[in-house]
Amino acid sequence: MKKEKDARGRLIDKYGQVTTRQYLVFVLTLFLIKTGGAAWYPAGCEIVEHSPNGTRVNCTDPVCKNPSFESSIFRWDGHHIIVTDEKRLNRSTMNMSYVTLQVNCEEHLTKIMKIDVLDVNDFPPIFDKGSPSLINVSEFALPEQTIWTFNAADADWNPDLSPRFKFILKGFLTEKYLKVEGSTEASIILNKPLDYEHLKKEDLTLILSAEDYCNFPCVTNYPVKTSNFTFTIHIKEEDTLPPIFQPPYCMTFDVDGDNGNESQLACANAMYNGTVMHDTTTINMPTPIRAKDGDEQLNAPIAYRILGGNDEKIFSIGDDGKLTLNDTAKKKYNQTYNLEILAVQKNNNFRSALTTAKIRVIQQNNYPPKFCKGRCGYIPSTEYMVVVFECHSLSPLRVLVCDNDYPPQNINPNARVKLRSQDESWATLTPDGYLLVNMSNMPPRGGLSNVEVTAMDLETNEATI
Ligand SMILES: [Ca+2]
Ligand SMILES: [Ca+2]
Ligand SMILES: [Ca+2]
Ligand SMILES: [Ca+2]
């Protein structure tokens, strides 16, 4: 690493302090100058760079009486040191931050005088021309990993000194996922792995700012200059997720529990129901068994296996997830087979998912489901939330689904009843089929209101209203 120097050319640490060893070298240099016959003369002289010819050099102590010196940059006017070559007072092209003069005083005394040249902030920081505006970052990249290092330059700093900057990174992701470190170059470091599935829809554009420092010694109230560089992070999709059975049950929740605005979608595998007629080999699956790679971009091919519930080996599963029957003779009426189905990526057997498929053997499916009775009800009071009673009865109205395929009661146990969505603001159907009404939300319809209920046989996918 290149070491930094202060205005006197001493090596300094990151706090701007001269280290002990380096300080000794500095003392030794002074000693050599003294033994060379000239005394160091710290007269506290300084001049602002680019000062025009004729400008006086400021010194806190008086220069000796009737001094003389040889210089192509300064002359003595009898009272002050005066600039004669303004072009050479340019900190960008000087390889030092000061000029020394060997001054001959009266009585043959020679002094070495140092004149600090104060930097003016002429140039803003500039990022390397070759800096990429698009950076690919793998989903596998780990925290504390440096994903890119940007270099910047500043023409106010002479070639012997590394310019120093304050780097700031801005963007939606910055605080949680990324940070910037460094003062001479900006290292973009990962705080947290970048999850493609979660972040792909977010704006990954980031702005890196470089703010320059005083190039010591510099003018007072050194005006800070800032430059921005915009770049985009593209998250490279990797095989991080297993397959998931479709359609999945998904919900969003606050992943880190901090009640922040970051919520993630969590999904569970679908489970399946199906039926097979007692005397046929056709399996009726209202929702076909199908799994999809959770890594959407990769979409790895999937293989299926039946892991459990198939002791008699009467079921097989194909490469497309389709269940077939090998043997009709072994299945018994009204028996339910709970098959454990595994979906595994063909290219990575560590990525797999498990679900169940319930296959019930039915005798027949000759009849669609239909509502048994109770298409009329009344509300016995005007309280806030009330149960609806069946017309001409003292029993609560219950929505039951009849199906002649289920003798002797002829009630379909696999039917799911649901309210039409626009009625849900004032009516509720319990899982048992009882209807509740919220009086305060009920639409005014002169005493008569309708609710629409749908019923679906989950085994056969048949519906009724
Ligand atoms: Ca600058
Ligand atoms: Ca400058
Ligand atoms: Ca995957
Ligand atoms: Ca992924």
Image: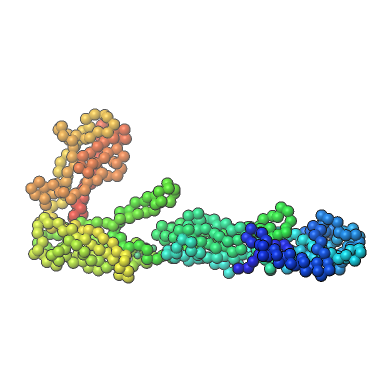
Residue 401 falls left or right of residue 127: left
Between residues 33 and 151, which one lies in front from this camera angle? Answer: 33
Q: Position of residue 132 (x, y in %)?
A: 54, 67
Q: Quadrant of the rendered structure where residue 92 is?
A: bottom right
Between residues 35 and 310, which one lies in front from this camera angle? Answer: 35
Instruction: Give the residue displayed 32% in from the left and 69% down from the top.
Output: 348
Color style of the picture: rainbow
Total marks placed: 0
Q: Quadrant of the rendered structure where residue 246 is?
A: bottom left
Instruction: Give the residue displayed 86% in from the left and 66% down from the top.
Output: 110
Q: Quadrant of the rendered structure where residue 130 is?
A: bottom right
Q: Position of residue 268 (x, y in %)?
A: 30, 55
Q: Position of residue 349 (x, y in %)?
A: 30, 68
Q: Position of residue 52 (x, y in %)?
A: 82, 61
Between residues 20 and 247, which one lies in front from this camera angle? Answer: 20
Instruction: Give the residue displayed 58% in from the left and 61% down from the top.
Output: 182
Residue 224 falls left or right of residue 401: right
Q: In the displayed structure, would residue 395 be above or below residue 211?
A: above
Asked if residue 325 shows in the view, the reply is no
Instruction: Give the residue displayed 60% in from the left and 68% down from the top.
Output: 1
Residue 372 falls left or right of residue 118: left
Asked if residue 118 shows in the view, the reply is yes
Between residues 144 and 88, which one lies in front from this camera angle? Answer: 144
